[in-house]
Amino acid sequence: MRTRFFGALAIAAIVSSVGILGNEQATRGGVASAGQDAEPTRTCDMVYNFPEFHKCAVENMGSFEPPRNADGKPDLNGIWRPTRIAQDIEEIVPGQYGNFPHMHTLIVDPPNGKFPYNEWAMKERFNNEKVFLSPTAVCLPVAQPRWSYSPVSVTGHRIMQQEDLIVFSMERLHTYRMIHMDDRPLLPEDIHLWQGDSRGHWDGNTLVIKTTNLNDLMWMDHIGTFLSPDVTTEERITFVDENTLHYEQTITDPNVFTQPVTISVPFLRSVTDNPVDLMDLEDTSVENCEEELIHMMNVGQVPFPGYEGIAPK
């Protein structure tokens, strides 16, 4: 196994999360965030208590008849807002990371809400945070394992669905994923990508996506939670009600974790009268990335191994 692991808490990475943090605070209790209409009634309204939402969704998703496409499959088309930030997807207590308020863990298995690290991997994760820059803080892609909870720019995640292909996109960093629904050959095992090789199928009303061929250049958060190139994931996306999707992802990486890890998060349909929020906008980068990178390198942080070429000249 390669030993290329990276990551550190980066100021620019925290700043990039402020937008979704603001939405989380603003939409609690049914108060709409900027550009949003009042929050619709939901079958499971505890959308920021992720373990409790997961339990409620699993109990209730089978009772909702989803909208359907012409092929009879559930219609996932639209823009969906994520509900979490990527600073640290375990529980965040007030004061742990500056001004961030309390946030529930995204991890629903193990039940304690913690990553089940191997002993050596826990040490590596702490070293990452101390030494290296978070990949997304230096404008590298949002990889597949953290796609579901990464902050976006203006719009949310767009799902574009066809019978044989489903595309997920977000405005930030030109991030997109292609989910092939046919039986085309898998990629060779020695090819590793930020988004991996994703193949989907329907299990009743649930979209199931299995992803292989991921690289080990990603972090699952901004504090160094890394994965090995042998990681595989399985995602399950199901309607809970008209405006809410239940998203579940199981991450299996025996090199790093002692057991598979399952996260769960709701996606909220974008309900707005502002037509701009429903448009495909120009793909964006992270503003002032080079200036932030220079600052962070001047205070002793460095790009992780393999990306020395991004350092400013």
Image: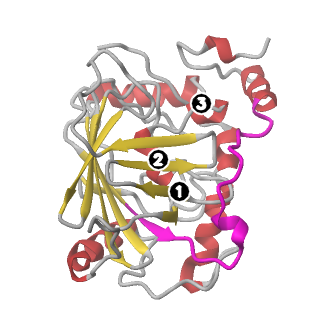
| Other residues around mark 1 within 10 Å, as few (<14) / some (14–19) / many (≥20) | many
Left or right, residue 134 beside residue 118: right
Task: Give the distance between the C-alpha atoms of the residues marked 3 and 2, in whole angstroms.
Answer: 13 Å
Task: Give the distance between the C-alpha atoms of the residues marked 1 and 3, in whole angstroms.
Answer: 18 Å
What residue is disc 1 on? 157
Residue 131: name its quadrant.
Answer: top right
Task: Report x, y in % for residue 130.
Answer: 56, 27
Nearer mark to the viewer, of 2 and 1 = 1
Q: Is residue 203 visible?
A: yes
Task: Report x, y in % for residue 123.
Answer: 38, 27
| Other residues around mark 3 within 10 Å, as few (<14) / some (14–19) / many (≥20) | some
Q: Nearer the viewer, residue 11 or 171?
A: 171
Task: Report x, y in % for residue 7.
Answer: 53, 29
Closer to the N terminus: mark 3 or mark 2? 3
What residue is disc 2 on? 147
Q: Residue at the bottom extreme?
A: 41
Closer to the N terminus: mark 1 or mark 3? 3
Nearer mark to the viewer, of 1 and 3 = 1
Left or right, residue 137 beside residue 228: right
